[in-house]
Amino acid sequence: MLELIIFSTLNGLLYGLLLFLLASGLTLIFSMMGVLNFAHASFYMLGAYFGFQISLYVGFWPGLILAPLLVGGIGALVERYGLRTVHKHGHVAELLFTFGLAFMIEELVQMVWGKVPVDYRVPDLLNFSAFTLFSTTYPAFRMFMLITSVVVFLGLLLLLTRTRVGLIIRAALTHPNMVGMLGHNVPLVFMLVFGVGCGLAALAGVIAGPALVTQPAMAASLGPILFVVVVVGGLGSLQGAFIAALLIGLVQTFAVAINVSVADVLAPLGITLTRDSIGGDLWMATVAQVAPIIPYLLLVLVLIFRPKGLMGYRET
Amino acid sequence: MNFVKIMNGLPLALALVFSAIGVQAQNVKIAYIDPLSGGGASVGEHGWKHLQFLVDAINSKGGVINGQKMEAIAYDNKGSPQESLVQVQKAIDAGVRFITQGNGSGAAIAISEFIAKYNDRNPGKEVLYFNYAAVDPALTNEKCSFWHFRWDANSDIKMAALTNFMTDRKEIKKVYVIGQDYSFGHAVRVAANAMLKQKRPDIQIVGDELHPLLRITDFTPYVAKIKASGADSVITGNWGNDMSLLLKAAADSGLKVNWYTYYAGGSGGPTAIKQTGLDHRVFQISEWHTNVPAPAMEAMADAFLKKYGGEAAQGWWYLRMKNQMDMFVDALNKAKSSEPKKVALALADMKFKNILGADTFMRPSDHSLFQDMYISSFGSGTKHDEEKTGWGWKTTTVIKGQDTVIPTTCKMNVPS
């Protein structure tokens, strides 16, 4: 049991940190520009594919640096020549723009790399088990993912709270017009934030690609969860996104380990439910079976009872 | 001058165009409807290569019924039953009368029911459905149809064989059942529980798990749970990414159990098993594997590998599709017609000696093929290996075709 708890915690933390790498950029972009970037997870996918392509020529490590830079650059260009132009027509147009962009990127990826998962390998340097606990091994690459994510989180936190750039970004989050009046180039700040956000998503892609599966569906499968993280955490709040990401990572991982169903809970109360009762499988489904939808349940509950999210300061 | 030249060439060009149309109209078309994108894409692509390879071979040997060519067309159903029906309709609209599908019993049931209904409403324009791999028992029992033929042993047959095999292995004490949350996964789970209880009541079933179909990219939490349960054996019907990623997660976590599987040999599976280091501890039940001694089949498997990707690529896998296409050709030639109803009647009671030289037969009462089944284990010291791992499949037990026969509840509705 202890073994299950320890490893579920590790796996949950890892998944949560990965979500955070993605959500951090998304939440900053969202609160700054008011745009829910539907294409955010697509940049994560691009990161994984770029990392894979680069790893074919010069190995994994250069890809770890180059892929996020490239994708960040693409993101900045998208903001400069796409979003900024569309911005004139309001938020709905921007939303639709990113929506279309997500489909375009997916189609492009399928054309270039095919529909079948690519063989993105864990680098040889990290292809061993980091430690063994109760006879379960933990791969070194996962350890590396964990550490990278924590380092990025700390870096981001320091950048936003301890530097001048961070000060301007935080100010632009809430009072963009005022910041502009003070002589700062707000559009440039937007472009940089968008670029860096996409770069962070790409970094998540590079480190997740070899451990999970690098395939054209990876963006579509992760995208919806990101919105949950952003909403639950609260708009524009990095700390909120961090807590929400970890929460969802842990909840999803632990839910898999729980085999309790409604019928089990009600059984001691003398109520017997079977597959043939009204409602059928609803009573028999275990928490483990419904694990994938628990985050969305959380989303619905948060929107009803605490619309501004855990740490947010304005209504969604 | 130029104009005259064009006018001179025109009749020839027109003749070519018309003859091209003429030839096309005579082609016997077969539509391949399987996932070519999403989590099942690697499996779907692999099956598509098989079909193309077989159709090419049929055409290079002179085609069917007095020299007609066969033509295979691929449609992507994304692994979903709903999308399958859209694609079936598309295929029918394109003039296809023969449809084959295999990956996913959910999609298979939807297609079979759709075609039965379609054929009822469109007499004279019937469509036939060849199922090369979807093994939910319902397809040849309560949901059986005259227009559906299956070339793989159904899930209950496979589970009966696997559990018979497990009965003699006294070291098995605790079993974990994990599967995909859809019709086939449910069928496997029910059969495994019932059969183990009957044959080995002393075995404790320590886990009975269903997970979402083809959507999980990290099985580590599930593997942690298997580990915590103390299981010494795992039974799973998983296929595609759900099999290879489960094995990959087991390798990463160092899970040491015996695996009793339907599809561990699928794409990515062998590589993952090699990583787990479980030498001859992963078992699979199938109608064939690369180390079944049969020169004709080995030669064909080699030719397939040569054509599609060489040594490192995944080799031949679906003997069942070879059986299907061979029997389809026999039925076309016997019926001397590509009319689906006549082909179906020719197929319904066909006896067939396959490329291994073994006897197989189609049972008219439920349209399912009975054939020898092999339980094999994956490990070192085999003649052919898989995915360049150096390990390959080795036969542990052969179950003769007639010993795999189980009763059916199908009430076949033969159209008059």
Image: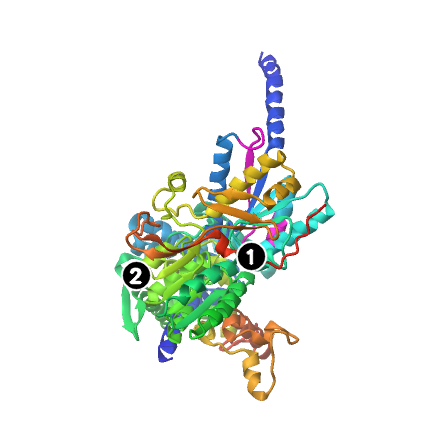
* Residue B195 drawn at (x, y percent): 49, 68
* Residue B157 drawn at (x, y percent): 50, 59
Q: Amino acid at mark 1?
A: Ser
Q: Is residue B70 magenta?
A: yes
* Figure quadrant of the N terminus of chain B: top right
What mark, if any, has residue B105 been given in the picture? 1
Which residue occupies 41% across, 42% down?
B297
First reached walking from the N terminus: tag 1 or tag 2: 1
Q: Label 2 marks which chain's residue?
A: B
Q: Label 1 marks which chain's residue?
A: B
Q: Nearer the viewer, residue B224 or B201?
A: B201
Label 2 Cα neighbours within 10 Å, binned few <14 / some 14-19 / many ≥20: some
Outermost residue, top side: B1
Q: Is residue B96 magenta?
A: no
* Residue A179 drawn at (x, y percent): 47, 67
Is there any visible trace of residue A123 in the rendered image? yes
First to last magenta residue range: B63-87
**Residue ID for mark 2:** B277
Q: Is residue A234 above or below residue B143?
A: below
Which residue occupies 68% across, 52% down?
B413
